[in-house]
Amino acid sequence: MEAVRLAEELLPGLPVVAYTSVDNIGSQRTALAAGLERREDLDEDRGTYLDLYLAKDW
């Protein structure tokens, strides 16, 4: 959450993006709690796993 706050303070207007594996529920919850939103349109299928993307101000 601190990273999102700092990004908003130091880099206003730029998006904040996080990605995690589909199995990492804890990271997904943390990103959502920090104000990021799930962005299925940014997901990357890596063949053996799926990266989920979350973003704010995208």
Image (tube, rainbow, N blue to C red):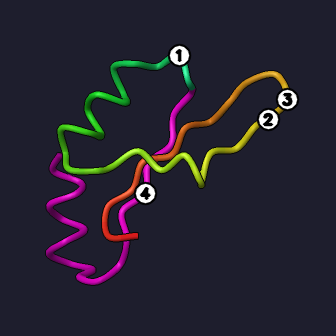
Q: Residues within 10 Å of mark 2 (few under 14, many from 20)?
A: few
Relative depth, front residue between 2 and 50: 50
Which residue lies under the disc numbered 4?
17
Relative depth, front residue between 28 and 41: 41
Which residue lies under the disc numbered 1?
23
Q: Residues within 10 Å of mark 1 (few under 14, many from 20)?
A: few
Give SS at disc 4: strand
- As shown in the figure, which amino acid type bears the numbered disc 1? Asp
Is residue 52 positioned above or below 37 on the image? Answer: above
Which residue lies under the disc numbered 3?
47
Q: Position of residue 27 (x, y in %)?
A: 36, 28
Which residues lie in the magenta part?
1-21
Give SS at disc 2: loop
Measure how far apart labels 3 and 4 are at the Cα level. Answer: 22 Å
- As shown in the figure, which amino acid type bears the numbered disc 4? Val
State yes or no: discs 2 and 3 in contact (Cβ < 8 Å): yes
Q: Position of residue 19 (x, y in %)?
A: 50, 43
- As shown in the figure, which amino acid type bears the numbered disc 3? Gly
Measure how far apart labels 2 and 3 are at the Cα level. Answer: 4 Å
